[in-house]
């Protein structure tokens, strides 16, 4: 398989996943704000903190109002992580590899892009937001399903799976990082019931609530949620699950030693840490390490299998 | 109401299927009877079914648009096939082989001893002004001495029934994928016709093309690594590039997928590492294939490709520099070229051609501009032409000025009355003008497509068949005598 084709598939998967994840965090933030007690209003800024695009955002906007944050995350073409930018990039990547990707998947992606573009105005309203985002999430899941169910599970599919899982692991760590900061004043005992709401929202942004209840059999609390989202092998958005999926696909590729070493390091870091005992600042440092590992893994994959960047063309 | 051919207006032209109003040619009898049996609405429904099939199969040419949801357009397909009897085709096929054989000898000679010039058959000044002559290629010996492995020659038939070669495309001729897809669509929408006819198959083209490429591989192997080199998704023929790569089981590569290493061999970047490439079927114009040898600003090509080719480590099809024989002034000399190299008379004649470079000929052309078609030497796609009889006085005067300024760059031909084929127009059938582009493959042996791509000018009275200017296409059938 051509390196360029492998690279395009990998990015196609990352961008589709990025669009879906962004739609998820927006949905859940909107719901969380409705559930919190009066006087507690974390606002919309945490969403920009999750994506890490604060510098760009502040260049473009004076304040973190709902309107600005939403437009930035849904449609700003200057922000490569916005849903519309991600779908545009996914579509461009898919266009050049149409002989590798089943036609239905291309059509679905094309439709999803057109929907995201044409339905945007409705999506920016309070009432239209929910159906708009829901359809985006469903559309992205449909693409993932179509590819899993119809594409040859050869090298190309492994790059797809690696891309999707790296992006997903990255987003999970970001969501936990930002959303685990305690929203409530510690001494306010009468607000304790609301702490649960915060962790429920973290779970819900990953459609993890129901699966958490099934697998953990304890009420929603920090220690168990952290273990679940980092270390569960069974939950498909947990970091451990994602890194194992990446490892399994790497095993099928040639010249995989260096990349497998990085995954091994990521796994040791992940499983040897007692996440439930981490203080908030320790958790933050832990997430930073994981993100560095994920970045290293991407770099190793690019170095091993993708086309050398421009050095031949120079 | 059914389709009525008794008033079919084909006087003054040669129609490929109808000899005179109400009188069909023998090879078309069954086809036209089947058409006559169709209700008009049924005809329109079949045409619509074909349009849908084309869309479903993704048969497109590309039109770049930044905004639109798609950049692919379907190319109009007309469901009534054009039929050519086998004996007539055999002669055409022999003529095409003869022609391309001579052209390959001619190109090879131009890049070596230039005997044809020294012998006074081909004027040196024509070569001196040939924009597609590549000095970088002088002295190169490509495998088997073949330069133009794939040639698409355009044939037309005049009112008296004579078939002429109108031009030869030796650079990157396209259209063969439409020829293949057209047959598939006809089978889908008109299956009953195949009860009376067994048109000779066209679908072995991709394997013949692969054989041609394999035959010039520098490393003999059963399955040499051949690739199709495309300029990318925004090229109008991208569909064809990707189609041929798929059909041949080859990688479709862009310039950035390939590199030339220190050993002067060509490699592609793959997931398994660098993989040696033996043959490049390049669909990028000469000037863009190698920034080291040609245009330094080209981002489409592969640095060092010409070096690797000169070293004999990779085969390029077509070879760079083949386009020198694409020149419309060179075209005027092809009968002499055939005579010179093969000592044969041309089997298929050239359209009578006036070379404006000869002073008395130029005077004749200038005096008769209202009856002639004038073409610049190196344009394709029907651009930059003057069609005298339909041009305005101002256009003719502009061309007169252009010709006088650079006579070498122009040829003139009489206005041909291109033959017609019945074509669906809504729920009726009317004659529309056609040409024919067969493809000729040359390596260790020569092969010609069974028929070719028939292009049709869909606008009434129009003679312009190019896809970019309102043309469409038809399926082309070569049938044994007795069918029909």
Image (spheres, rainbow, N blue to C red):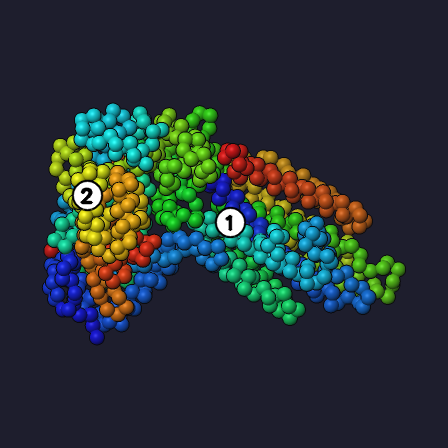
Q: Residues within 10 Å of mark 1 (few under 14, many from 20)?
A: many
At a point 37% along the width and 46% down the height, the residue shown is: B241
Chain under numbered label 1: A
Indicate left or right for A58 with A92 as reference: right
Chain under numbered label 2: B
Q: Dot 1 corresponds to which residue?
A: A93
Q: Quadrant of residue B90?
A: top left
Disc 2/disc 1 C-alpha distance (Å): 57 Å
Q: Residues within 10 Å of mark 2 (few under 14, many from 20)?
A: few
- Res. B363 mark: 2
Q: Is residue B168 above or below residue A151?
A: above
Indicate left or right for A93 with A195 as reference: left
Closer to the camera in the image, A96 or B96:
B96
> Is residue A241 visible to us here?
no
Q: Position of residue B106 (x, y in %)?
A: 23, 32
Secondary element at tag 1: helix
Q: Position of residue B94 (x, y in %)?
A: 16, 41
Q: Is residue A210 above or below residue B156?
A: below
Q: Is residue B117 above or below residue B425?
A: above
Secondary element at tag 2: helix
């Amino acid at each position: 398989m051509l390196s360029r084709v492998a690279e395009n598939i990998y990015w196609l998967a990352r961008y589709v996943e990025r669009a879906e994840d962004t739609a998820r965090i927006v949905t859940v933030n909107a719901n969380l704000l409705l559930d919190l007690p009066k006087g507690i209003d974390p606002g919309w800024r945490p969403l920009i903190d999750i994506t890490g695009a604060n510098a760009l955002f502040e260049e473009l906007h004076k304040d973190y109002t709902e309107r600005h944050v939403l437009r930035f995350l849904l449609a700003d073409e200057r922000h490569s992580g916005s849903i519309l930018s991600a779908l545009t990039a996914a579509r461009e990547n898919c266009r050049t590899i149409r002989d590798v990707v089943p036609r239905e998947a291309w059509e679905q992606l094309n439709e999803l892009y057109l929907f995201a573009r044409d339905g945007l105005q409705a999506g920016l309203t309070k009432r239209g937001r929910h159906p708009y985002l829901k359809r985006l999430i469903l559309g992205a899941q449909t693409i993932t399903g179509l590819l899993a169910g119809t594409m040859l599970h050869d090298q190309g599919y492994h790059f797809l799976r690696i891309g999707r899982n790296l992006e997903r692991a990255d987003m999970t760590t970001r969501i936990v990082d930002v959303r685990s900061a305690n929203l409530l004043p510690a001494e306010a005992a009468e607000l304790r019931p609301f702490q649960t709401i915060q962790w429920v929202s973290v779970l819900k942004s990953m459609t993890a609530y129901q699966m958490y209840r099934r697998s953990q059999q304890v009420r929603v609390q920090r220690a168990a949620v952290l273990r679940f989202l980092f270390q569960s092998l069974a939950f498909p958005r947990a970091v451990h699950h994602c890194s194992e999926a990446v490892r399994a696909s790497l095993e099928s590729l040639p010249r995989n030693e260096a990349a497998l070493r990085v995954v091994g390091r990521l796994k040791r870091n992940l499983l040897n840490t007692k996440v439930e005992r981490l203080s908030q600042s320790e958790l933050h440092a832990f997430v930073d390490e994981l993100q560095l590992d994920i970045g290293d893994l991407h770099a190793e994959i690019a170095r091993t299998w993708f086309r050398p960047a421009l050095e031949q063309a120079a | 109401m059914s389709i009525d051919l008794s008033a079919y207006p084909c006087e003054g032209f040669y129609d490929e299927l109808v000899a005179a109003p109400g009188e069909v040619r023998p090879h078309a009898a069954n086809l036209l009877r089947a058409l006559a049996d169709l209700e008009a609405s049924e005809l329109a429904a079949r045409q619509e079914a074909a349009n849908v099939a084309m869309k479903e199969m993704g048969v497109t040419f590309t039109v770049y648009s930044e905004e639109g949801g798609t950049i692919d357009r379907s190319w109009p397909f007309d469901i009534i096939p054009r039929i050519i009897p086998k004996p007539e085709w055999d002669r055409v096929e022999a003529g095409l082989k003869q022609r391309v054989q001579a052209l390959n000898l001619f190109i090879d000679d131009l890049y070596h001893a230039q005997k044809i010039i020294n012998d006074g058959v081909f004027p040196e000044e024509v070569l001196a002004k040939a924009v597609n002559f590549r000095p970088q290629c002088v002295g190169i010996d490509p495998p088997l001495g073949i330069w133009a492995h794939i040639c698409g020659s355009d044939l037309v038939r005049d009112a008296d029934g004579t078939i002429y070669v109108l031009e030869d495309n030796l650079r990157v001729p396209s259209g063969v994928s439409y020829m293949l897809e057209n047959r598939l669509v006809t089978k889908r929408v008109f299956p009953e016709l195949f009860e009376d006819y067994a048109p000779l198959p066209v679908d072995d083209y991709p394997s013949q093309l692969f054989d041609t490429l394999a035959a010039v591989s520098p490393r003999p192997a059963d399955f040499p690594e051949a690739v199709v080199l495309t300029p990318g998704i925004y090229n109008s023929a991208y569909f064809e590039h990707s189609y041929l790569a798929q059909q041949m089981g080859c990688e479709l590569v862009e310039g950035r997928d390939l590199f030339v290493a220190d050993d002067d061999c060509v490699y592609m970047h793959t997931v398994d590492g660098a993989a040696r490439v033996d043959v490049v079927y390049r669909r990028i114009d000469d000037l863009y294939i190698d920034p080291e040898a040609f245009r330094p600003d080209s981002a489409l090509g592969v640095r060092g490709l010409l070096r690797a080719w000169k070293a004999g480590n990779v085969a390029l099809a077509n070879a760079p520099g083949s386009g020198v024989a694409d020149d419309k002034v060179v075209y005027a000399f092809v009968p002499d070229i055939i005579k010179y190299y093969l000592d044969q008379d041309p089997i298929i004649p050239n359209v009578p051609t006036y070379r404006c470079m000869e002073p008395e000929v130029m005077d004749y052309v200038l005096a008769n501009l209202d009856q002639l078609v004038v073409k610049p030497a190196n344009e394709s796609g029907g651009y930059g032409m003057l069609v005298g009889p339909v041009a305005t006085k101002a256009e003719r005067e502009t061309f007169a000025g252009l010709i006088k300024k650079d006579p070498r760059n122009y040829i003139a031909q009489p206005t041909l009355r291109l033959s017609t084929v019945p074509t669906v127009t809504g729920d009726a059938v009317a004659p529309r003008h056609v040409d024919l582009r067969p493809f000729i493959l040359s390596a260790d042996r020569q092969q010609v497509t069974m028929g070719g791509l028939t292009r049709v000018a869909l606008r009434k009275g129009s003679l312009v068949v190019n896809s970019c200017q309102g043309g469409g296409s038809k399926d082309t059938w070569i049938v044994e005598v007795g069918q029909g």
